[in-house]
Image (spheres, rainbow, N blue to C red):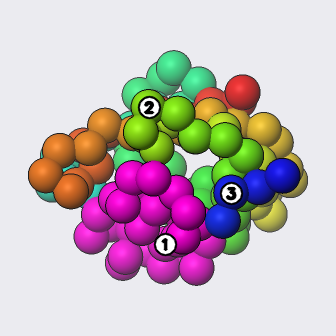
Amino acid sequence: MTIANDRLSDPTVRSLVTAINANDRAAFLALLAPDATMSDDGTERDLEQWIDREIFSSHGHLEVRSEADAGRTLVADYRNDTWGEMRTRWRFTVAGNKITHFATGQA
């Protein structure tokens, strides 16, 4: 069972998931703090290179299965044209309605 995007608890995370699923890079970037960072499977990555490769050029899509931490931790089925589908965990740090860091990896 999935959680519809409009039912996600944290409004900033909700908007980010919506931007990913709409393949809207500009909306995604608008939700990030200017010095935002990210990690994938515990390794810090170059945020813009990673999102271009893993989300936007490969048509990434999230189907959220569960949320915790007031909507700032998600378990989701993530798929893109490069890797297919996998169960992933996403953790977001939000300050002032901007994402300052997110971490993702296999769940």
Q: Is residue 94 visible?
A: yes
Amino acid under disc 2: Asp
The part of the image, by quadrant, that contains residue 29 is bottom left
Amino acid under disc 3: Ile
Relative to 93, say whether 84 is above or below. below
Amino acid under disc 1: Ala
Label 3 crowding class (10 Å Cα cut-off): few <14, some 14-19, many 20+?
few
Relative to 83, say whether 93 is above or below. above
The part of the image, by quadrant, that contains residue 93 is top left
Q: Which residue is mark 1?
A: 19
User: Which quadrant does the C terminus fall into?
Assistant: top right
Q: Is residue 91 visible?
A: no
Query: What's the CA distance linking mark 1 and mark 2?
Result: 21 Å
Q: Earlier in the sequence, mark 1 or mark 3?
A: 3
Residue in front for this viewpoint, 89 or 58? 89
Identify the residue shown where x is 46% and y is 62%: 14
Identify the residue shown where x is 68% and y is 57%: 3
Query: What's the CA distance linking mark 1 and mark 3?
Result: 16 Å
Percent across and percent down for residue 53 are: 58, 57
Identify the residue shown where x is 22% and y is 55%: 98
